[in-house]
Structures are given as C-alpha cells and as structure tokens.
Amino acid sequence: MSEFEPKIVAFFCNWCTFTAADLAGTSRLSYPPNIKIIRVMCSGMVDPKFVLKAFLNGADGVLIGGCWPGDCHYINGNLKARRRVALLTEVLKQYGIGEERFWLRWIAASEGTMLKEIAIDMTAKLKQLGPSPLRNMGQMAV
Amino acid sequence: MAKFAKLSFKKDELNKELAGFFKGILENGAVDAVLVPMAQTKKGVRLTLVTSPAHTAQVDPFAPMAAVSGAKIASSLTSRPSGRKVAMVLRPCEIRAVVELAKLKQVNLDDVLLIGMDCLGRYENTDFAKFQEQAGTSEAFLENAQAGKTSLSDFDIIGACKICEFPTADNIDMRLCAIGAGSGSVFIEAVTEKGEEALEKSGLKSGEAPAGRDEAVKKLVAARTEARDKKFAEFRSDAGNFEALRDKLAACVNCYNCRVACPVCYCKECVFITDTFRHTGEQFMAWADQAGTLKMPNDTLFYHLTRMTHMSLFCVGCGQCTSACPNDIDLMPLFRTCADKTQARFSYQAGRSMDEQQPMAGFKSDELVEVTGQVK
C-alpha cells in the first residue's frame, strides 16, 4: 500500500509568508508538494470559515502563515489572526482536530528556509497522525 | 450599600403586590415605561411594555417561562433609543446577554433601569401552557422550586435551567429577590444609586435584608454547578468527535431557528443566508462527485461550527436554541460545553462584567505565544 499523503491547505499572507514561499522557489529549495498554497492579503483576513471549510472538505491539516508580530503590513492583522486561531482551536479540539493539525506560524519574507522546514515538519507530523477524522465521513457528513 | 424593601403578600396576591411596585415607579416618574412579563388576556405570559400606571395589574414577573429571550427585546427597544426611561424586568440569563449586546452596541443602557429577577428556571412554551391549565401560579412555583420541586405531571423546567449556576442577576440596578425570602414575601433590592432612587419613588420602605438569602443562593448555586459539571462530562464523553457531533445533529434541517432565537448571535445578517451560500447547481454536483453523495440541505456541520466560533464566547446558556429547534435537537449542551472551553481560553465569562473587553475585540503583541510556539 502506498504511503499516506496528507493534504495541507495553506493560507499565506501576501507580504511575508507568500514572499518566503517565492524565495524558497527562486532559491531552488524543495519542500513537500502536500502543501497547497492559497495566497491571501493578510493572515488577519483568514475567516474561521475558510479553515472550517477546508477541514470539512477533507484537508488533513491547515497552515496559516503570517508576518511576525510587529511586521504586519497592515500593522496588526496577524495579532487578530492569532486570537482567532486560538478561538477556533478550542472549538475544533473538542471534536478531535487539535493543534497538531491546525498551525499558525510566523514566516518572514526572508525566511524561505524556515518555510521549507515548516512544510517538511508539518507533512511528517501529519503522516504520523494519519488522515483527518473528517476525511472518512465524506460529503455526507457536512 | 444595598437597600432592601420587603414585600409581604397574602395567598395569591404576590402579583398584586408587585403590580403596586411597578405602578409606583411609573406614577412617581422614576421611569416612563416598564418592560415586564405580564399575563395575556387568556393564555400565556409575555414581556409587555407598559407606559400607563393604570395597566400594571396583570404583571407576573416570576412566571416560569420566557417565550423569547428578553435580551432581544431589550435590543429592539434601545438600539435606536426612544429617549424615555424604561425599567426592564429580566431573567439573569437575559441580563447577561444584555451585557454582551451592550458591548456590541446592540443594546443602549443609557435610559434603562435594569431589574434582575431571581430565576429558579423556566418551562418550555408548550409546557407552560400545561402549567397554566393545571392552575399553576408563579407563587406556587417559587415555593415548590425552592424546595427542589420543579417537575409537574409530565414535564419539568428545561435542561438549561437545571444546570444554570446564575439564579440571581448581576450588573443590574435592582433585584427582585425570591430565593431565601421566606414564605409569603419577596424583597426588592436596590443595588445602584439609580435603583435606590427608584425604590424611594416607588413608595416602599426599605428595611432589613432577607436573612436566609445569601445561604439559600449559595446552596442553589452549588447544586446547579454540580449538575452542570456532571452534564458537561456526560455530554463530552458522548460527543467528543465529529461523527458523534454529526449524529447529534442528524435531525437538523438547516432552518437556522437556533440562531434566530439566540440572544447573542449578533450578526445583523447571517452569512448562511447571503449569496456566499447560494451555490450553483454545478457547484453542488461537483461536491457530490467528490464523495459520490451530498446530503441536502448541505453545510449542516459547517453552520453549527461557524455558530460556535461566532457566539460561543458570549453564550449565556439560556437554552433558547434548544427551545427553538423544531426537530427537538438538544442544542444547549452543544453550545454550552463549547462556550465553556472558548471562554476559559480567554479567561472570559459572558455577562460577567461591562468592563471586560470581548476577546475578539482586541489583541496584544505579547500574548498567546503558545499558538505559534515561535520566539524571535
């Protein structure tokens, strides 16, 4: 049987993390293709519904990438994102999707290497964990 | 220092005495209007806006029912204010929701005299009708409920009330005290300056505090808290994964009544009725293709989980969601157990204080470091 390949939906902020992904690319760093990137203007615009929908539609993990505190292009969008992530984590945790599947990470525009490491790290952790508990429920569930 | 006025009543005359108090504050200009539960012509009790002192006779503030949350009525009355002073007699859960709505600027308390009544629970709407048919009175209910007896022939107070640890109201100007008030009397307590002024104008004399009250309240809170923890543990062991959650919600038809009834579902327009969720046929087909099937209406779990992220921080545990469900889904424990976790994460408690900022209304640069676990 082939190895389980987790699907990770990643919301990357335009100014820092997406730029870091761009840098990783131009630097010819390679990271697992499990990460599917959605470019957003700010981590602070990631509505909890985006994350819920990703999980309900079968994502094994969700990664939100934003600027480090103090570096947000919109001054504090990332800090709002952090509160929302804490809130949504509390909701999801009760039904079996915990911090290990739902990550928020600060990755600056210059941190292409860190982006690569986080992508490798998250993919490896999710491989160990196995598919999301929502995945087997299929669309019938949602 | 709080002031108490004792209101003694003869058998079947509790409401008559209370009517006298409301008449007093209306007549003497403490307020221009009173919003208070009142008996309707034949059946039922509803919050009623009274502006004439001649029409207070039918008041029944302790009636064990709340057809809709009074917090929503408070919002209708004050979000675009009349400029007239109004006394609002509400249950503790309604007051706590009012506190949250005031923070959201959906209730304006400027001209409001908040009167919180002691609450020993409420019956469902349909059960309250039976209660009335069986000649049940608020007076008898107060007495029996304090002795721990709330059940009647084939019904009881709702599940939310059985696990409610807030039988008395805070953040109010006055209280209607029934718990530990002794047989044949209730007390009207003035808590704030505004409340004291109203008490004075009502013509009632202040005197001794009810002797047994503090202890009676403490005992009731302890019993309710224990029941709450037991219910939480039971529910969690029973609904700790998405499959169990789906099964709990199996009867849901996406009517969204729970969010209509919810006093703290604060969005003016719910996203689930906007064009965001008006999908094309093609989109539905694409989703069905993914797993081979698509339950319709779809997005049931999505809706409830979204509601949890929206309102759980403000959930006051009033049980209106359960009451509103046409398919008898007991939603209250679902939202209350969730609220317990989310509120704890932010050391927040819905309705506790006017001064506590709502968690999603602010942020700090040096908090919640554990979310990313990264330190620069």
Image (tube, rainbow, N blue to C red):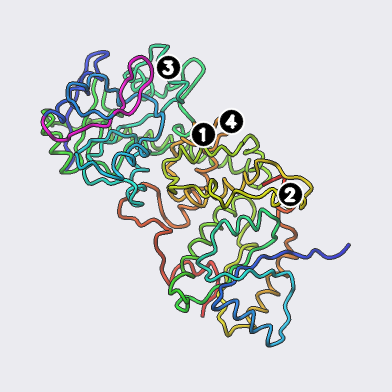
The residue singled out by tag 2 in the image is B285
Q: Earlier in the sequence, mark 3 or mark 4?
A: 3
Q: Pointer 1 and pointer 3: residues touching (CB < 8 Å)?
A: no
Nearest the eye: B122 or B308: B308
Q: Residue at x 41, y 24 (%)?
A: B148
Q: Secondary structure at mark 3?
A: helix
- Check residue B322 in the rendering and tell me which mark sits there, or answer none: 1
The crowd level at tag 1 (other Cα within 10 Å; few <14, some 14-19, many 20+) is many
Magenta residues (range) = B28-48
- The total of numbered circles placed on residues is 4
Q: State which mark lies toward you, 1 or 2.
A: 2
Determine the chain carrying the residue at label 4. Answer: B
Residue B45 part of the magenta segment: yes
The residue singled out by tag 4 in the image is B327
The image shows residue A24 at horizontal and vertical percentages of 66, 83
- Check residue B223 in the rendering and tell me which mark sits there, or answer none: none
Amino acid under disc 3: Phe
Q: Secondary structure at mark 2?
A: helix
Nearest the eye: B81 or A56: B81
- Specify the quadrant that holds the N terminus of chain B: top left
**Residue A138 appearing in the image:** no
Q: Earlier in the sequence, mark 2 or mark 4?
A: 2
The crowd level at tag 3 (other Cα within 10 Å; few <14, some 14-19, many 20+) is many
Amino acid under disc 1: Thr
Q: CA distance from mark 3 to mark 2?
A: 50 Å
The residue singled out by tag 3 in the image is B131
Q: CA distance from mark 1 to mark 2?
A: 33 Å
Q: Residue at x 54, y 33 (%)?
A: B325
